[in-house]
Amino acid sequence: MEIKFFDIWYWFVVMAVVSYFVGCFNFALLISKIKHKDVRKMGSGNPGTMNMSRQFGLKIGAMTLFLDMIKGGVPLLIAYFIFKGKVFAGTEVYVSDLARYVCGVSVIIGHIYPVTMKFKGGKGIASTLGMYSFALCCETQYPWMIGLVLGVLLLTLFYIWASEWGSMGSLLGVSLLAVAQGIVFFFRYHDSLSNGFVIVIFMLLFADCVLTWFAHRRNLIALLSGEEHHTSVKKLSHRKKESV
């Protein structure tokens, strides 16, 4: 089924705005408030998975990771099913390919720059992992994609466990998934790479990488100068659960 962009452009605006405000909801802050604390005033001050793990233990960190991944993936999944099977008029570009990344990247922007937290949010890794995980699992014509996603996630966890470089492992993980999605889109649209919709899709993938890497700029500077804090998964797994 073909759809003219000018007949549905307002849907993209609505999806972007709603997804942004979904991204503004910070689970790390909520969980720390339930524990009568403010994660923004603890450790690195970052309301994200790593700092939550360091302050409250690995289980709470894993819970934060899972919830943020869901947050990054659900808006995208909804957009995918709304526009599934539809293409832009006069092209072979799937509306769902553009819609899901409009939603996904909007969530990431909301997570990193939430208006509800004076534009000082997390670093977007967990939500980005959720975005790519959900998006790549939507590639039903490539059933092995689920295995690839799980493989990258496990490889990321192994790298963090072995190297104790949490920020670098996280960035490598999301970058690998971004490359995987880029390769899928390249082969899908190799005959129409100059199409405006295809260009925007690739720009969204690139924008997400820029956002997450830029959000980690201080970590990268600290890493290069040898001042980056180690993240020992072993120590975190033995951390006693703090009382509420």
Image (cartoon, grey):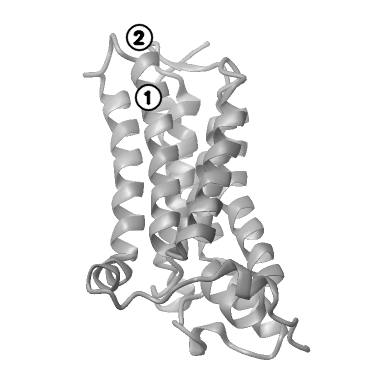
Q: Residue at x 48, y 74 (%)?
A: 116
Q: Sort mark 1 into few (<14), some (14-19) or many (20+) by Cα contacts within 10 Å.
A: few
Image x and y of residue 163, in percent: 45, 61
Q: Residue furthest right?
A: 243
Q: Amino acid at mark 1?
A: Ile
For the residues labelled 1 and 2, the Cα–Cα distance comes to 23 Å
Residue 51 is situated, as x and y percent measured from the top left of the image, at 53, 75
Q: Which residue is mark 2?
A: 90
The quarter in which the C terminus is drawn is: bottom right
Inspect this view and state whether residue 225 appears.
yes
Within-10-Å neighbours for mark 2: few <14, some 14–19, many 20+: few
* Marks 1 and 2, the one that precedes in the sequence: 2
Camera-side residue: 15 or 188?
188
Give SS at disc 1: helix
Q: Position of residue 139 (x, y in %)?
A: 55, 23
Q: Which is in the foreground here, disc 1 or disc 2?
A: 1
Residue at point 56%, 58% (across, down): 22
Query: What residue do we see at 66% from left, 84% from top?
Result: 33
In the depicted structure, whether residue 2 falls above or below residue 146 = above
Residue 183 is tagged as: 1
Q: Examine the rendering and report whether any part of residue 19 can be seen.
A: no
- Asked which quadrant contains residue 66, the reply is bottom right
Q: Quadrant of residue 230?
A: bottom left
Q: Amino acid at mark 2?
A: Gly
The image quarter in which residue 204 lies: top left
Relative vertical location of residue 137 with respect to residue 45 in this rendering, above or below = above
Residue 203 shown left or right of residue 143 in the figure: left
